Every structure is written in structure tokens, then in C-alpha cells.
Amino acid sequence: MTIVLMAIAGFAASFLLDPAIARLAREPYERGEIEEDDLRLKKDGGAALELSSETGALSMPRALTTGAIWRRLTVIVVTTALFAVIGWRYDGDPAGLLVVSAYVAALIVCTGTDVLAYRVPNVITYPAILGALAIGMVADDANPADVWAGGLITGGVFLAMAIATRGGMGMGDVKLAFFTGFALGLTLGIQALLITAISGGIIATFLMVTRIRDRRDPIPYAPFIALGALYVLLV
């Protein structure tokens, strides 16, 4: 019964998450912060990057408009399925259902905005970091030292990668890594980090070998961070 109720909750939540993803991904376009060189990276993905004949400005990708049915359906299916798994995994644990649902919703939004616009929004990551840290300090079964260690080590690894790659990895990914580390703690955070590294490395290698991307092109890393966290949280 919990699985069904959570699936229904996920279905309802998807109608809030989808417009949030689209709005947050659109913000750089609306503020004029996206340059033609940035948009060029999206053209191979069929994002319909075109020049406006009247204004001379680059048009917004169709994926970010309210008419992007495929984006909406994807968010609905993914959110409903993940919430159903939460219901299965945390059946009988009301606090776990609530907390993990909030974590998963944050991961869905950050994944969506990163895929669509190479952006992991601060409006999601900062509250998520503070919330995960606060829960880790007061939860009955949490170890504050483990929570701090998980966040600092996981986030620190991504911060070191961002510095080493000189912008190849964005600070949004670093903040998302801090969040997952605080949410999972040290032991589970390291497991998630390994899954993130393996899956991200495989996909990055494939994209470069097939020349879909080269070493100078950014690759959205939030999906891999989310994958590692979701596996640990739900499996």
C-alpha cells in the first residue's frame, strides 16, 4: 500500500518538479548569460538552437519551453518510479519516507537542469546542503561526525577535481556533491562516490571516443552524482 501511495505522491510531485526544472534551466537564457559558444555544445543533442532573425539573439532550446512534452513525460515517469521505490525501501519509516523524498526531489531537479542547461542551481543546492546537515545533526540514528566527514570528503574530492580540471567541472557539481555527502555520511558517501566515478568515467570515455564531445566540452555530471546517491539511498 505504501508503494502505491508513494507512486501517487510522486506523480503529483512531478507536476511541481517539471516546471521548476524548466524555469531554473531557462534563467541563464532569460538573463542573456548564455553565449553562442555555450549553445553550440547543445546542437548535437537536437535542442533546436537557432538564430532569431528579428533580434539577432539565439533562441531558447525547445526543451526548455512549456511545450516540451517529452521532458514533462520523462519527469513524470522518473519521479513516479523513484517515489514508488522509496515507498518500498522505507515502508514503515515515516521520517525516512519524508526525508528521502525531499532528497530525491532535489536530485531530480539538479539532474534535469544540468542536462538541459549545464546548470546546477544554488537555489536547490544551498538549502539541500543545510537541510541534510541539520538532519544529520539531530536524527536519532545519525552520527554527526560521520555526516561531517561524508560531506567534507565527498565535496572535497569534487572540489579538487574542479580545481584540477580548471573549469572542466562546475562548482554546481561540487555543491551537489557536498549535499550528497552530508545526506549519506562517510561510509555510504564513499560507496556513492565510487558509483559516480565509474558511471561518469564510462560515459565520458564513450562520448570522447565517439567524438560526441571533446576534452574541452563540458559534460553534465549531476546525473552521475545523483545516480550514486540514488543507488545508495534506494538499493
Image (cartoon, rainbow, N blue to C red):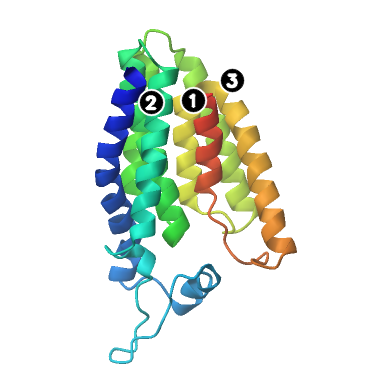
Task: Give the residue number, with chain letter if any, for mark 2.
Answer: 100
**What secondary structure is found at the residue carrying circle 1?**
helix
Horizontal and vertical percent for residue 35? 43, 76
Q: CA distance from mark 3 to mark 1?
A: 15 Å
Give the amino acid at mark 1. Answer: Leu
* Among numbered discs 2 and 1, the one appearing first in the sequence: 2
Task: Give the residue number, with chain letter if any, for mark 1.
Answer: 234
* Among numbered discs 2 and 3, the one appearing first in the sequence: 2
Do residues under tags 2 and 1 come within 8 Å of each other at their CB atoms? yes
Task: Give the residue number, with chain letter if any, for mark 3.
Answer: 187
Looking at the rendered image, the disc whose residue lies closer to the viewer, 2 or 3, is 2
Q: Quadrant of the C terminus?
A: top right
Q: Residue at x 60, y 66 (%)?
A: 217
Residue 132, located in which quarter of the rendered image? top left
Q: Residue at x 30, y 65 (%)?
A: 65
Q: Residue at x 49, y 25 (%)?
A: 234
Looking at the rendered image, the disc whose residue lies closer to the viewer, 3 or 1, is 1
Residue 129 appears anywhere in the view: no
Horizontal and vertical percent for residue 211? 70, 68
Give the amino acid at mark 2. Answer: Val
Give the amino acid at mark 3. Answer: Thr
The one nearer the camera, 208 or 31, is 208
**What secondary structure is found at the residue carrying circle 2?**
helix
The one nearer the camera, 71 or 36, is 71
Horizontal and vertical percent for residue 115? 47, 56
Characterize the local packing of mark 2: few (<14), some (14-19) or many (20 or more) Cα atoms within 10 angstroms: some
